Image: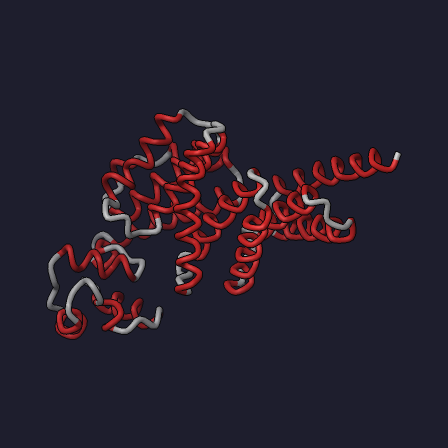
Amino acid sequence: MDIKKFVARRKALQISQIKLSAGICTQATLSKFERRGRVPSLAILEQLCARLGLIVDELNEDQASSVTQMRQELDHIERQLMMEDYQVVLQALNRIAVSEIAAVPLRMQYYYLSGLLKSLINGAVSDVCFDFDQILDDLDQTHETVFTPLAYVGLGVMYSRLSELAKAQFYFEKVHQAVKQALVNGDDQDYLRLLTMIFYTAEYEATREDFTTSNGLINDGVSLCSEQHVTYYLPRLKYLATANAIQQCQPDEQIQQLLSETVAFARINHNQVVEVKAAALRRRYLQARLGRYS
């Protein structure tokens, strides 16, 4: 077992032994593991690794290569989903046999990606629920991982698209609470997934015309993008901010500025989906203005 990898990850994240072991085991148990290689129970080791974003199999040098490869593949698919490249995501997921994914966090990631994709492309309700049930009722029964609120996102999206708004509201309220808790705690290790929660909750609130909540979430998302120096979500957040501004009849100067920022970030990220949507939004906005003044 490669214990050095475990210790290096803990130090890189600047997590003390006391903080890492809290609620899982004693600091002495963790210290014995790190200094003497005395391995605690598998249940304890799995919890410690989960807090570091590791999988126990990654510490096993014989299995590390295959686990790392699968993690990289799923991470790539997750980025493509953020870019709204649904056809590519669908093809990539179809190439993976989930039965061959042994590591629990990776299985949760697979089911999250599969369920959210199906929600977004109006897949069968039974298929969406099956994917998220794997997380909520089996793999994350204690609801301690980031995949539980992500599953709530997918269920909220599904019910929103079905116009079952009471059910959508139920799930998005849970997501919003998870977002607020993460922002208060400064828990941004999974910042891209936090941005996913922020975006879809903001989008949902906009459909309810609760622009105060929606715009507040958009601002949180933009700030998080700035802090983490990432741009994946900026085109979508700016597009949503533009659509909200139009709905709220904000000044033309503000709307034009937001449209320009949306297109600029879309081009930087090679996000043609948002670029096309922004062009269509601009046309509708200009036509509406001409209609008002004609």
Quadrant containing the N terminus is: bottom left
Residue 286 seen in render: yes
Horizontal placement of 162 versus 65: left or right?
A: right
Give the residue at the far right of this rendering.
Answer: 294
Horizontal placement of 76 versus 250: left or right?
A: left
Quick one: 29 or 214, which is closer to the camera?
A: 214
Say above or below: 272 vs 222: above
Quick one: 15 or 73, which is closer to the camera?
A: 15
Residue at (11%, 68%) from the top-left corner? 38
Task: Choose top left, top right, bottom left or bottom right for residue 223.
Answer: bottom right
Residue 62 position, x and y percent, is 20, 54
Residue 90 seen in render: no
Quadrant containing the C terminus is: top right
Residue 120 position, x and y percent, is 48, 34
Horizontal placement of 29 versus 16: left or right?
A: left
Task: Choose top left, top right, bottom left or bottom right for residue 167.
Answer: top left
Count of labels shown?
0
Residue 276 position, x and y percent, is 67, 38
